[in-house]
Image (cartoon, coloured by chain):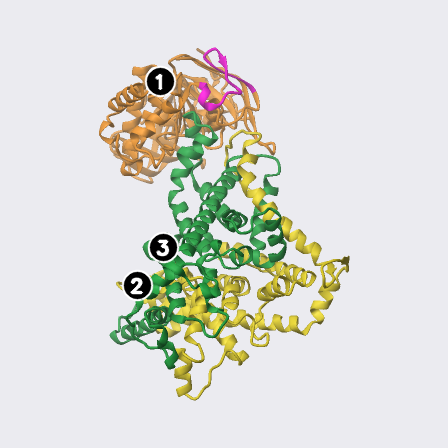
Chain colours: A green, B yellow, C orange
Amino acid sequence: MVEHRPLSQLAAHLILIAGVALVLFPVYIAIVASTQAPGEFLRGTLPLVPGGHALENYRAMWESGLSRAGAPPVGQMLFNSLVMALAITLGKLAISLLSAFAIVYFRFPFRLFFFWLIFVTLMLPVEVRIIPTFQVVADLGMLNSFAGLSIPLIASATATFLFRQFFMTVPEELLEAARVDGAGPLKFFKDILLPLSVTNIAALFVILFIYGWNQYLWPLLITTDSDYYTVVMGIQRMTTAADGDPQWHLVMAAVVMAALPPVLVILFMQRLFVKGLTETEK
Amino acid sequence: MQTKRMTFPGRWLPYALLAPQVIVTLIFFIWPSLQALYMSLLREDAFGLNTSFVGLANFRRLFADTYYLDSLSVTAVFAIGTTLLSMSAALLLATTVNRMLRSRNGYTTLLVWPYAIAPAIAGVLWWFIFNPSIGIVPYVLEMLGYRWNHRTSGTDAMALVIIAAAWKQIAYNFLFFLAGLQSIPQSLIEAAAIDGAGPVKRFWTIVFPLLTPTTFFLMVVNVVYAMFDTFGVIHATTQGGPAQATNILVYKVYADGFVGLNLGSSAAQSVILMAIVVALTVVQFRFIERRVNY
Amino acid sequence: MASIRIEGLEKTYPGGVKAVKGIDLEVADGEFVVLVGPSGCGKSTLLRMVAGLETISAGALHIGERRVNELEPAQRDIAMVFQNYALYPHMTVFDNLAYGLKNRGFKRDEIRRRVEAAATMLEIEAFLPRKPRQLSGGQRQRVAMGRALVREPAAFLFDEPLSNLDAKLRVQMRVEIKKLQRRLKTTSLYVTHDQLEAMTLADRLVVLNDGRIEQVGTPMEIYARPASLFVATFIGSPAMNLIPLDYLHTNGGGDTATALLHDLPEGTDIVGIRPDDLHMRAPSEPHLVVESTLELFEAAGAESHLYVCLAGSDQPTVIRTAGQPPVAEGETLRFYVTRDALHPFNRESGKRIGDHG
């Protein structure tokens, strides 16, 4: 900005601090709640400072979950979420890299048709075709399995387009030099194209991991066996406990644990996250 | 569509490379969508024993159904509310952060992480804060003379889910606004300052018009988000209630089909939703073409 | 080592555009042949067809005794140096040089020996562990050369390898390429649009225009006897002056001129004169005289360029002369030209008219 007036600078800081506070507020409350003793909530309002029961609440959730609400131990759900998120992420990356490679580096009949076929998936989010997709997965015997949790979600038009865009910017001469150097298509893909795509793969990894971790409707539909519950959907089960109010101190401990992995990914890979986010949406 | 100037020869290899993506797409995207189209033309009796072809009757019934029409308007209120709230908060924060030099990255880090929170979890967090008996916000509101209860008041419930959905989306809008602001040449701002425009005037006459492409893009993305990605917010909190007050379209598809087992109607709703996504995608791509020329 | 034999080579792109319209050329074993021409003349396409990077629409291509029309680039036993170097950005210099050898299944020791030998020859040993982005333009150029060298191929193909360098480095690398080729005696085909680079590097020069060969010969043959108006103006800097014969008849200096011009072959209607061949002092042998007005004087150190307008016409003409003659802009100057400096052309055909001995 052009002017440097101390007063407006101060106002700007105040706005931002208020914004940050607003953004942080719900999570602060969750952390505070997760450290309270069970009886604390019966007394009316929620305390605003942490209590001393953090360790026992977290341990209870990690080890045994809320069996009364049909929720398995959070440790196990976190593991399920991790497996699902990684399978979705790696699956999407792998099949998108291969498709983009085929579309950019080969000319073959029906190339355009396949391109549009992949493109159309953008317009068919799972939310709009719930029942028939559920039926397909049920017919294939994939209910209550990691395959069922991940495979139906690994088609990715966005990732394919991103890699296509990136491959188009790889200089033509690299391909030509590689061919003069005796590299066939798969060798070129492995030796040249993949190493050059590392930054893009990493950026997309961050975005897709968060996407996979945060899946909600899909696991809700296809898991009835609590061994396969993921943590994001498991929390919903805890809040709708049959009798009376949820045990908020325990639910909030689970919420904190469920939110932590993707938040850590963003905080530690912020640069890649921003790159992945702004580039996939172009 | 382009390829490289030189391509690899290969008769079967490109098909093999495409196969995983295409197979997943056909089995889990195309086939179910066609099924939805087909099912939208059928009706099952109450016991699921008999199905008969009914043409467009499911659609006609939907548009005569006040619950469905209510759901349409509920969705519109929810989408517009979420988009406006989230985008205006994000724009304020982004323009303010953009003035900072040293603290810019620090604030950015503190503001972007809610992107990582799942919509369902965001819903649970705000559900808890607004909990009528123990929540902190109703406590404050009560002192101000307002009795908050999202379990009985449709307005309160709608406000709650809008706040939860918008809160999660601020990070996304913030990052795009910040990127848009940073792509505005500093020289334009300086030229406007020399022309005698103060900071507020500069924002509305120079910065905001130049942000139009970003704003428009974000509007489409936010509407798509509010319509389709917020299933978790609703399901984990109000479950469409009270009295259908927050029963948005995607939630209704799920509730009617999966819980209510009214397959024909649910399929018809799916088809209408697909048409909406297609329309929004077309708008988005048309706009991207124009953005290139901007 | 091998020769390259090009017979009736054509390139038609899908859509019908013809980039190469029938080229016949033989590059002898160990010869350095330069393809030169303006952009779009088909020289790069021709080179890329030899490399196997473009398919051949018609004609035959032999490298050594093998017909290679349908072979993959890697099977043609050629190495190529690209305009933008095309170094693999994620590999070290060593791996860049070694990649082609690895793909061909060379033993590790042999790869190391060859890479080190090439690196020594090009004085890039110190850069072997670095990545390309840590190198300067000139160093990258050397690595690109090295990648071609280690292969010890039958032929080197160069696609404007110096055009991304600054003027000074370009001259330096030009000399090195020439020395290297002399030493290795590898058959080389080199594409450039820079006529000075072409003249200085080539054993034999091929001037291309619009997908066809205009002229083939040693650089000096082509400079001394350009076969067409195109070659005449393309080779040599500043370009050759082209003056209508009629003008010289009327303004060339009387009877001597008439006799001298009469000696030109039948069909000549335009005459080329190199900027060096317009002299400021009258020679002893018979000559033409032209009068002109000096419009612009350009001092370039050891030589000067005089941009003049011939008297009684708007014909712009350039004269190159040694040193710095004492002239002023606006002054009327007189130039002298002898018979052997006149290049006879026919405007309609664009060709040189067969002249005496």
What's the residue at 49%, 67% (across, down)? B236
| Rendered view: A251 above or below A218 | below
- On whether residue C71 falls in the magenta region, the answer is yes
| Rendered view: B293 above or below B201 | above
Tell me the element at label 2.
helix
- Which residue does the numbered mark 3 point to in the structure image? A265
- Which residue does the numbered mark 1 point to in the structure image? C152
- On whether residue A145 falls in the magenta region, the answer is no
- Which residue does the numbered mark 2 point to in the structure image? B104
Which residues, given as a range, are shown in magenta?
C59-76
Q: What label sits on residue A164 in the rendered view?
A: none
Can residue C97 be seen in this snapshot?
Answer: yes
How many neighbours does mark 2 have within 10 angstroms: few (below 14), some (14-19), or many (20 or more)? some
Q: Is residue C113 left or right of residue C40?
A: left
Can residue C249 be seen in this snapshot?
Answer: no
Tell me the element at label 3.
helix
Residue C200 in picture, x, y percent from top left: 33, 22
What's the residue at 49%, 28% (across, down)? C42
Q: The residue under label 2 is which amino acid type?
A: Arg
**Quadrant position of residue B44:** bottom right
